[in-house]
Amino acid sequence: MRVNLLKLILILAVGCGEIEAESLKRIFKDELGRIVEIPENPKRIVTVATADIEILFAIGAGDKLVGRPHYLKYPKEALRIDNIGGLYECNFEKIVAKDPDLVIMSTSSWDRYKNNLEKLEKCGLAVVGFNYPESIEEILHHIKVIGDIAGKKEEAEKLVKDIESRIDRIKRVAKKLKSPTVYREGIYYPERIGYTSTKGSRDDALIHLAGGENIFSEVKKEKPWFIPNPEEVIERNPQVIIITADLDKFSQDEIKKIIKKRPGWGDIEAVKNNRIYVVEDQLSWANPRIILGLEEFAKAIHPGVFNGK
């Protein structure tokens, strides 16, 4: 029977029976430039980002999870996993008590939270750090990397190929169509205007891929999102309005009423033509469901073309 060379060396070195594959280690360089020794095939994973939970379930590694963060909505079966507090309210005692063989940490704010990683590492845990993916390309790369370290490399590559195929299908159709102007807003509080996106943001990319033209794509800002002046939206007069919101808190009809009641917005072409669309906000986040978000954007921007497809 053929035996993995590294496995054979370890067997001979320790003078005992066959070592299970999952006890083998590998060297991994994370996105903070750290060299970390991690399991070849981890069995007990803790992650502090909801996006990483979604990725692990999407590639068939959900059964490996023993700790998940706050504020999780999807997938529902992940809610059965013990809550370990997440990155922002990190419960070190709970994480250590879960005895994970791998902790995955992703954030866009390492200057604030690197101490959490270091503290867990001092507890003797294998911890890998990633920059929270921003662009669609970064999301797809992140899925592949998570699949690699979770022992689900082939499954992750298959998922990425499926997402890329669906993106390409929409791009091929959309590039043949006229691009209507689009205003995208994320609403968290009904009493005030939410944030919108500039060039370089995921939402701007979704609008472009779906065959639309973001009315704020040329705006120069320090970050790829900002709170717009309501009067400026009226002046730019978008043909389509796409609102992203937590649909567990708001109904689509409620959101549409909020938009229509804003002073002066009744003169906007999208409002006059009843072209206000509401999309679940997590479909535009950095997770595998970003493809569903793109498909919803495409249906909103070109309803006669993409609806039902």
Image (cartoon, helix red, strand yellow):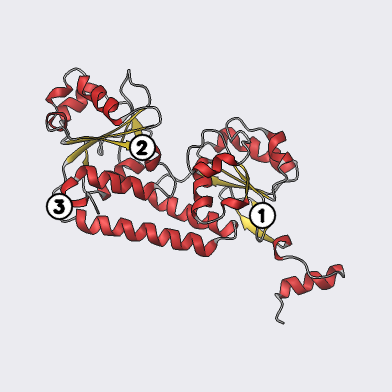
C-alpha separation, residue under disc 3 versus residue under disc 2 = 25 Å
Residue 219 location, x and y as percent?
Answer: 27, 34
In the image, taking residue 208 as reference, residue 73 lies left or right, namely: right
Q: Note whether residue 48 is visible.
A: no
Q: Which of marks 1 and 2 is nearer the N terminus?
A: 1
The residue under label 2 is which amino acid type? Answer: Glu
- The image quarter in which residue 275 lies: top left
| Residue 245 higher or lower than 134, as above or below | above
Q: Which of marks 3 and 2 is nearer the N terminus?
A: 3
Farthest residue toward the right? 15
The circle drawn on residue 43 is 1
Mark 3, mark 2: which one is toward the viewer? Answer: 2
Q: Which residue is drawn at 73% across and 45% down?
A: 99
SS category of the residue bearing label 1: loop
Quadrant location, the C terminus = bottom left
Q: Residue at x 75, y 45 (%)?
A: 124
In the image, taking residue 17 as reference, residue 246 lies left or right, namely: left
The residue under label 1 is which amino acid type? Answer: Lys
C-beta proximity under 8 Å, tags 1 and 3: no
| Residue 256 higher or lower than 65, as above or below | above
- The image quarter in which residue 259 lies: top left
Q: Mark 3 points at which residue?
A: 177
The residue under label 3 is which amino acid type? Answer: Leu
